[in-house]
Image: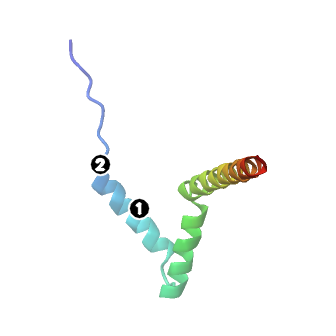
Amino acid sequence: MKTQIEPRLDCIQMKRGIQRQIAQETKGMTPAQRLAHYKRLAAESPFAKRLKEQGQKSNKRNQQLAHQTHFGDRVRNAK
């Protein structure tokens, strides 16, 4: 019985395609405009959104811990 081999991902071809796409998007931009473009893309990326969500969860947890610690200090000091 013959095993069917799945095609592999060509990383180099993918990288070059992405570079061509970026070159077309930024064609004619000044360095400052390119920087602003890259910052906007980074801020809108799924990774950035995930980091922001994690940061919000972390801040909420830190606030809860701070409240518990403050409440615990008041209970200990009342004794």
Q: Name which residue lies at 56% across and 79% down.
A: 36
Which image quadrant: the N terminus?
top left
Q: How many marks?
A: 2
Q: Callout 1 environment at 10 Å: few (<14), some (14 to 19), or many (20+)?
A: few
Mark number for residue 18? 1
Does the rendering let one see residue 30?
Answer: no
Residue furthest to the front in view is: 79
10 Å crowding of disc 2: few (<14), some (14-19), many (20+): few
Residue 24, image x, y percentages: 47, 72
Give the side of residue 72 with respect to residue 51, left or right. Answer: right
Furthest residue in direction right, as rendered: 78
Q: Nearer the viewer, residue 41 or 67?
A: 67
Q: How is the image coloured?
A: rainbow
Give the image location of residue 57, x and y in percent. 65, 49
Between 50 and 32, the residue placed more toward the observer is 50
Give the vertical position of 55 relative to 28 (above or below).
above
Describe the element under mark 1 as helix, strand or loop: helix
The first of marks 2 and 1 along the sequence is 2
- Which residue sits furthest left? 1
Residue displayed at 72% across by 53% down:
70
Asked if residue 37 can be seen in this view, the reply is yes
Callout 1 amino acid: Ile
Identity of the residue drawn at 66% across and 55% down: 59
Is 56 situated left or right of 10 in this image?
right
Residue 40 x/y as whole percent: 59, 71
Residue under circle 2? 10
Is 24 located above or below residue 13 in the figure?
below
As measured in the structure, the alpha-carbon distance from the residue carrying label 2 to the one carrying label 1 is 13 Å
- Location of residue 17 by image quarter: bottom left
The amino acid type found where label 2 is placed reads: Asp
Mark number, residue 46: none
Is 47 located above or below residue 43 in the figure? above
